[in-house]
Amino acid sequence: MLDSKSVVDLCISKGFALAGVTTASHSSHDAVLRKWLKDEKHGEMEWLNRNVDVRLDPRNLVEGAASVICVADRYGKLEEEPLCARDGRIARYARGRDYHKEMKKRLHSISDTLREEFPGEQFRACVDTAPLLEREFAQRAGIGSVGKHTLLIEQGIGSWMLLGAIVTTAVI
């Protein structure tokens, strides 16, 4: 059986900058999120108002979920590229290939490897589009800390990272 360190090593071998594992449990931000939504702080992002119970507990996303494997990917170059006066700027996270597809491909590869180790267990890869509070689980998994600007920060990377997760019924 793989332990959490082996799973983290597997994630790093697939190119992720950081990885960690935590238990699948109810969010500690339940009341805050529900009030924020009630006060319509989400603006036009109506999708945040859907699947709230799933968003607050990964066990509602994957029945019987026991663990959440969290990963972080770096984005952007540290140095600025020179721009001509007429050039527009593109957000660093949006440069290059679609990170949703690229990260999900690697998360599926990790899930396939883990299925061999944990036969009969379920694995659900999540990158930004699943109703999961990735930032909270990433902090619980030890990937970083949430800063005042509400982003996850890690000392070596800062907040220049994209988050993904695998919700699984396997106990890791």
Image: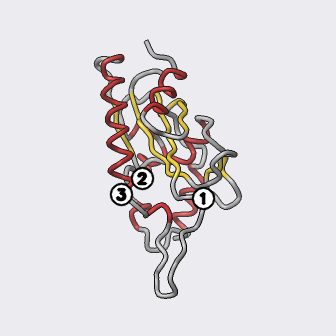
Query: Residue 12 at x, y = what percent?
Result: 49, 33
**Quarter of the picture holding the N terminus:** top left
Mark 1 and mark 2: span between their CA atoms?
Answer: 23 Å
Residue at x-position 56% and y-position 49%: 30
Judging depth in this view, the residue of 133 and 107 nearest the camera is: 107
Pointer 2: residues within 10 angstroms few (<14), some, or many (20+)?
Answer: some
| Of pointers 3 and 1, the one earlier in the residue sequence | 1
Residue at x-position 45% and y-position 38%: 15
Mark 3 and mark 2: span between their CA atoms?
Answer: 15 Å
Residue at x-position 56% and y-position 69%: 39
Q: Amino acid at mark 3?
A: Arg
Q: Which residue is mark 1?
A: 78
Judging depth in this view, the residue of 82 and 36 nearest the camera is: 82
Query: Residue 159 at x, y = what percent?
Result: 62, 54
Do residues under tags 3 and 1 come within 8 Å of each other at their CB atoms? Answer: no
Q: Amino acid at mark 1?
A: Leu
Query: Residue 100 at x, y = what percent?
Result: 36, 52
Q: Which residue is mark 2?
A: 128
Q: Label 1's element?
A: loop
Query: Residue 34 got which mark?
Result: none
Which is in the foreground here, disc 3 or disc 1?
A: 1
Residue 153 in the image: above or below residue 167: below
Query: Residue 72 at x, y = what percent?
Result: 52, 44
Please indicate whether residue 32 sits to the left or right of residue 87 in the image. right
Which is in the foreground here, disc 3 or disc 2?
A: 3
Q: Quadrant of residue 114?
A: top left
Query: Residue 97 got which mark?
Result: 3
Judging depth in this view, the residue of 12 and 116 nearest the camera is: 12
